[in-house]
Image: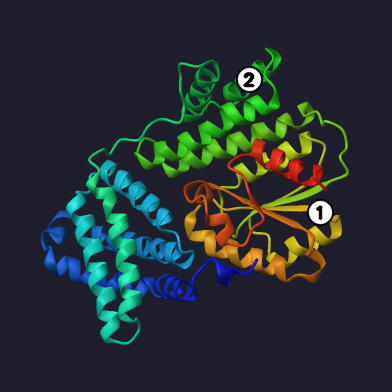
Amino acid sequence: MQLSNTIPEKCTSMGQFLYTNCNTLSEKVVERQYARQPELTAKYGKKGKKLSLQDCRYHIFYLGEAICVHSKPLFLDYMQWVKVLMHNLGIPEKYLITNFQIIKEVVSEKVAENQFTKEEADIIHEYLDAGLMAFEEKENDTVSYIDRNTYYGKLAGKYIDLLIEGKKNAASDLIFSALEKGATIEDIYLNIFQPSQYEVGRLWQTNVISVAKEHYITASTQHIMSRLYPEMISQGNKDRTVVATCIGNELHELGVRMVADFFEMDGWNSYYLGANTPAESIIQTVNDTNAQVVIVSATLSINVHKLKALVQELRNSKDLENTTIMVGGHPFNIDPELWEKVGADLYAPDAKQSVALANELFDRK
């Protein structure tokens, strides 16, 4: 699949310009905003201005990423996320809205400087306007990913409560007790670990837990998952191999690890590479293992352009012409067309469906 058929070249170049120059652009935006709203200095001080600059860099980087991969849904999702985050930090919406309005101004000025055409600036404005729609919604609350009225919801709720309290051993005991009562590994992964990880992200976003606590909970779940390996029962040997990895330096690798485990339980030979694996090493592993499928995950939308580049490298490898590339992760759940835009063959929203799609594909061959 040729990427040029799915993503306009000008979108790629505009997006790259924005996230490459986000430092310079954000400095101009923040200086102008503090001059226009002098109460910001009195209210938040020098530390607040430094944080504003950091936030603005993220805004422009996420904007550039969304344009680069031609996906307004990604930027709207980011804006909805940052709206809730800032609300729970006590930052008035008017300051965020002004910030994005000044970004629009700065982009317009780039036309006069011949760094953008009028058409390109209009496209960026369209993305910003789409993102600003998030502020038209009055709701700032988020809904829990755990339904504590169901059997597994109660278990997931208790599990996350224990980890928030720092009781890793008790959380582990809860999981093994569920297994003894008849739960399967698949049940545990899909109904306890998966919603719990989503809930951890929501609790951080709403300022209920710290980043440190979020990392503790994730590391604890990874440790418990490693203890579950002896309990996994492979459903035969299908003589099929999958390589699973996540893009770049993402720390949110638990999801793709779950995917690799599901393939292992289904009888596939599974190679989980995790984060920070260089592209050449991924390609070499796929070659060495004769893998039929390679799965690449991205949790943060700012890493989608890196994922797209990896897919292209896999495509360019002459030895991998018959290898199926599957992608997944939060950005692909947000934009149902994104997997095609990055040049993948398949997309699945979770571990169970990843295995089902792969089996369906090869059962037809």
Which numbered dot is residue 291?
Answer: 1
The picture quadrant where one finds residue 248 is bottom right
Residue found 27% across the figure and 52% down from its top: 133
**Tag 1: amino acid:** Ala
Which mark is in front, 1 or 2? 1
In the image: residue 260, left or right of residue 288: left
Which numbered dot is residue 173?
Answer: 2
Viewer-proximal residue, 122 or 25?
122
Rendered image coloring scheme: rainbow
Disc 1 is placed on an element classified as loop
Q: Position of residue 186 (x, y in %)?
A: 68, 28
Inter-mark Cα distance, 1 to 2? 36 Å
Residue found 58% across the figure and 24% down from its top: 171
Determine if residue 269 is in view. no
Report if the CB atoms under discs 1 and 2 are less than 8 Å apart. Answer: no
In the image: residue 168, left or right of residue 271: left
Q: Where is residue 280 in the image (x, y as percent from the top left)?
A: 73, 67
Q: Position of residue 165 (x, y in %)?
A: 47, 27
**Tag 2: amino acid:** Asp
Residue found 41% across the figure and 53% down from its top: 73
Disc 2 is placed on an element classified as helix
The N terminus, quarter of image: bottom right
The disc, 1 or 2, on the residue closer to the chain's N-terminal end is 2
